[in-house]
Image (spheres, helix red, strand yellow):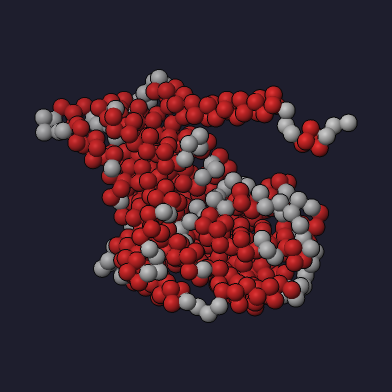
Amino acid sequence: MLTMKEKTTTPPSASAASAKGGNKNHLIMMALPIIVAVLLLFVPVPEGLPPFAWHYFAIFVGVIVGLIFEPLPGAVIGLTGVVVIALCSQWLLFSPEQLADPKFKLAGQSFKWAVSGFGNSTVWLIFGAFMFAAGYDKTQFGRRLALILVKYLGRRSLTLGYAITFADLLLAPFTPSNTARSGGTIYPIIANLPPLYGSKPNDPSARRIGSYLMWVAITATCITSSMFLSALAPNLLALALVKSTVGISISWGNWFIAFLPLGVLLILTMPLLAYWFYPPEVKINDEVPLWASRELEKLGKMSRNEILLLVFVCCALLMWIFAADFIEPALAALLVVVLMLWTGVLTWNDITSNKPAWNTFVWFATLVALADGLSSTGFIAWLGKEGGVLMTGISPGMATIALLLTFYLLHYLFASTTAHTTALLPAMLTIAATIPGINMEVVVLVLCTSLGVMGIITPYGTGPSPIYYGSGYLPTKDYWRLGTIFGVIFLAALLLIGYPWITMMF
């Protein structure tokens, strides 16, 4: 008879084989971006495109492939792409005419381009907003908000769904990472709720209420990510890409107005739709509000730092909405960060130890530089010209709808909204700009406000998706089925409500 140890210990040969297989897969994923880039370098240069622009595009595609498969962190992939292009800028970045100019200093210009993204105001706005999220976490103000809503709305399953939705809504304007907002603040709270109903993960009892709550939470964060410019980091990246590609600036207020009627409708109806399409078995439970009350008692009264944080983030929001002409939004965010440091809401150690913020800062700075390179080499202009030919004869309205459908549905191919935005948004905008009579501000707002809601379609569509998918409450078949249903609902709402409203307003 086998001993317990013999039963549970993995044979050394199996462990070695598993490790070997994992290493092999990792090496393949690391090699894939290089292979794709090299293959494209040997593809004949398309007619009308300078060779250096095509070669730049080949490296850019390699970076996108790396961002999709992530053999290394996204920041490493982006930084690698920038360094490779800067080192080979003579063949990848600058035209023969520029190189022939005796006043042109190749080394200096290459470095200047490589670090250009770090001076981008949007990148600093993203960084500042991450510090706001750190304040929410350190002071526990975000947890307090969520618990208050659960206390007063948690007796019924449906109103508990609304409590989760409103908690995300309240945090969204100040939290540019929906992973931090939903995965880091909302999920740890609601993960405590299903056991109060006897609902367990990876068990038939999951449908008692756990499945419903998890689906509401991921759907809510997708909606709020579209509702506010500052609720999703790729929204802010899109802001920079739009500015560099077509020269249009989007204010926080214009973004909010553009999505407002659609956002309000979805916020008010989504928990009910989830209640119909994925109904919980338990409708009422008196224990949940009591649990939330006990947790709030543990937190005690609002602290000085919580009050200061609330004042600071409200000031930042007011400056973003009403004072953008007088103070750059990124500078407003940095001002609030300085105030938090001087008042002790955050410490300098909180800033330097915030790995997600610095990781995103480097990642997005390199992506902004890479995307700008597509424009400066002339690739975007060429792509727009070729795409415009394909769209010849299509009315501006139909062209806008076609671009939205393409942009939205292609998200199935991406496990990162950032990669999706970097790869597709400049191309879509450039094609749109070649269509006579099209309203570019409308196109920009229609495409950009879809970035959040499109994350619902797959279990890998946005940052928090894997967290909820891996919770044990959302089986694979259920997630794909519901993702399709709600993905279609969101897309239909964009086309039938969002697009006409934006056209009327802008």
User: In front here: 61 or 471?
Assistant: 471
Would you place residue 57 above or below residue 318 in this image? above
- Residue 122 vertical placement versus 71 (above, below): below
Q: Is residue 334 visible?
A: yes
Residue at image coords 30%, 51%: 120
Q: Which quadrant of the figure contains the C terminus? A: bottom left
Residue occupying the far left of the picture: 102
How far across and down, in percent of the image, does residue 263 sit?
54, 65
Q: Name the residue at 79% across, 32% down.
A: 6
Foreground of the two, 464 or 390: 464
Residue lying farthest bottom?
301
Q: Does residue 84 appear left or right of residue 27 in this picture?
A: left
Q: Position of residue 123 (x, y in %)?
A: 35, 52
How many marks can you see? 0
Name which residue lies at 39% across and 23% down: 41
The location of residue 143, given as percent across then percent down, is 56, 68
Q: Residue furthest right?
A: 1
Image spot of residue 455 (x, y percent): 56, 51
Q: Is residue 269 visible from the viewing direction of this image?
A: no
Q: Which residue does the image show at 58% across and 70% down from the upper left?
A: 146
Q: Quadrant of the N terminus?
A: top right
Would you say 418 lies left or right of 415 here?
left
